[in-house]
């Protein structure tokens, strides 16, 4: 068995390299996503005895490394782009976020006996990931110190349900009646922002779904220079230090929330947001962290907690869907906007792009991305808030 921490890092780096290469090359692996593929590969290596179930490498990746990754991802968020979303997309996103929080809370109360004492942690993680995205799942899980088995099972259930929900959101607008089309188009014309001055409408030739949308969102434009890396390193170390200090001085507000606040403030500085490679490096660190969680997972334990966790994800997303589409229609929001906003909640900005592109909703593409990025910004707050609310209810 490989036990040297440096050698363990090497194996995890190979795992992430293989996972991202498989995602890029094969459609089946793209459907799973590099995060889940990396978790499964590392889990396999750990369970057959090639790498250990516990290592100081995992401790580092679950602490400073994943925090640095989250900070770098947040440095790409321009909060001002949210105003481009228009009132209807923002309203739909807000309804969806409330639906997620309600769904995760109800699921926790229903399934606490089946999942166990860490159910309140799962409530926080699913609230976070179904408000923003996988980075929020990782951040809240690291902050709450969720066990490796529950973490891995949660990721697996998330991937399955997110894929099913994408299919559902692609289908819902097709149920549109002729009467709805007229009223909905009027709402969209009033509130939606155009993609560009010459952008196509939903009636024009629809763009094809982008390949590797998450890669597109976080890819570097041009070469990453030494200055970019040096400034990013200074920002990350400074942000981590400040968030740790504030977390200790101003408890019980956890350090991850201070990290989120500081990174978002810095991201509004054009120079900082323009640093090349921040998103790519941040996502790579998150993938390493997720792989380390896979390595710490014992298959027998995951099998035990697996089915209830799938039920948890199903319940959360089902209640989210009932609320966003039910309440959204009651207040007069159109189904196309609700579908894109729901994907921004459940799958993040990449899923919002995929759905808007696949259905030709050109006027909803950038608004969907904007609220998806907003989800990254607020997901940690919502997730930790729900976890703190649910914990005493479950006697945690």
Image: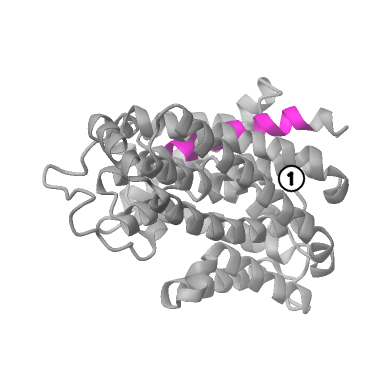
Please tell me whether residue 371 is drawn above or below residue 166 in the rendered image: above
* Residue 72 appears in view: no
Q: Is residue 286 left or right of residue 54?
A: left
* Residue 41 appears in view: yes
- Residue 178, horizontal then vertical, whole percent: 32, 45
- Residue 146, horizontal then vertical, whole percent: 74, 48
How many numbered discs, if any?
Answer: 1
Colouring: one colour
Please tell me whether residue 146 is drawn above or below residue 323 in the rendered image: below
- Residue 340, horizontal then vertical, whole percent: 40, 45
Please tell me whether residue 148 is drawn above or below residue 63 in the rendered image: below
Regarding mark 1 in the picture, which secondary structure is present there? Answer: loop
Q: Is residue 254 left or right of residue 79?
A: right
Taking the spot 51% from the left edge, 40% from the top edge, the residue there is 237
| Residues in magenta, as a range | 373-390
Q: Is residue 228 magenta?
A: no
To which residue does mark 1 refer?
Answer: 145
């Amino acid at each position: 068995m490989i036990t040297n921490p440096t050698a363990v890092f090497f194996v995890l780096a190979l795992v992430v390299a293989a996972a991202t290469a498989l995602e890029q090359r094969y459609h089946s692996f793209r459907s799973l996503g590099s995060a889940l593929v990396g978790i499964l590969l590392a889990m396999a290596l750990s369970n057959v005895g090639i790498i250990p179930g516990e290592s100081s490498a995992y401790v580092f990746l679950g602490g400073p490394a994943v925090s640095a990754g989250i900070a770098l991802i947040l440095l790409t968020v321009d909060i001002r782009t949210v105003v481009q979303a228009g009132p209807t997309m923002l309203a739909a996103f807000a309804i969806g976020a409330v639906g997620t929080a309600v769904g995760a809370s109800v699921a926790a109360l229903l399934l606490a006996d089946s999942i166990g004492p860490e159910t309140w942690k799962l409530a926080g993680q699913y609230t976070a990931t179904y408000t923003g995205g996988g980075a929020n799942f990782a951040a809240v899980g690291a902050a709450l110190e969720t066990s490796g088995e529950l973490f891995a099972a949660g990721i697996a259930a998330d991937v399955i349900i997110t894929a099913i929900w994408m299919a559902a959101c692609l289908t819902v607008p097709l149920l549109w009646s002729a009467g709805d089309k007229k009223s909905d188009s009027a709402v969209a014309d009033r509130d939606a922002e155009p993609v560009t001055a010459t952008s196509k409408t939903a009636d024009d030739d629809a763009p094809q779904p982008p390949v590797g949308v998450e890669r597109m969102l976080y890819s570097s434009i041009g070469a990453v220079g030494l200055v970019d890396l040096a400034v990013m390193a200074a920002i990350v170390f400074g942000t981590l230090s400040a968030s740790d200090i504030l977390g200790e001085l101003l408890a019980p507000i956890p350090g991850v929330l201070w990290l989120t606040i500081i990174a978002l403030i810095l991201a509004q500085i054009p120079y900082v947001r323009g640093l090349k490679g921040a998103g790519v490096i941040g996502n790579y660190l998150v993938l390493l962290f997720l792989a380390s969680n896979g390595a710490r997972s014992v298959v027998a334990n995951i099998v035990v907690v697996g089915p209830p966790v799938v039920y948890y994800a199903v319940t959360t997303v089902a209640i989210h869907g009932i609320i966003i589409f039910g309440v959204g229609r009651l207040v007069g929001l159109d189904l196309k906007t609700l579908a894109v906003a729901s994907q921004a909640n459940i799958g993040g900005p990449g899923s919002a792009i995929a759905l808007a592109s696949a259905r030709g909703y050109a006027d909803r593409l950038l608004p969907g991305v904007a609220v998806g990025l907003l989800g990254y910004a607020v997901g940690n707050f919502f997730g930790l808030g729900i976890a703190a609310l649910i914990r005493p209810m479950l006697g945690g």
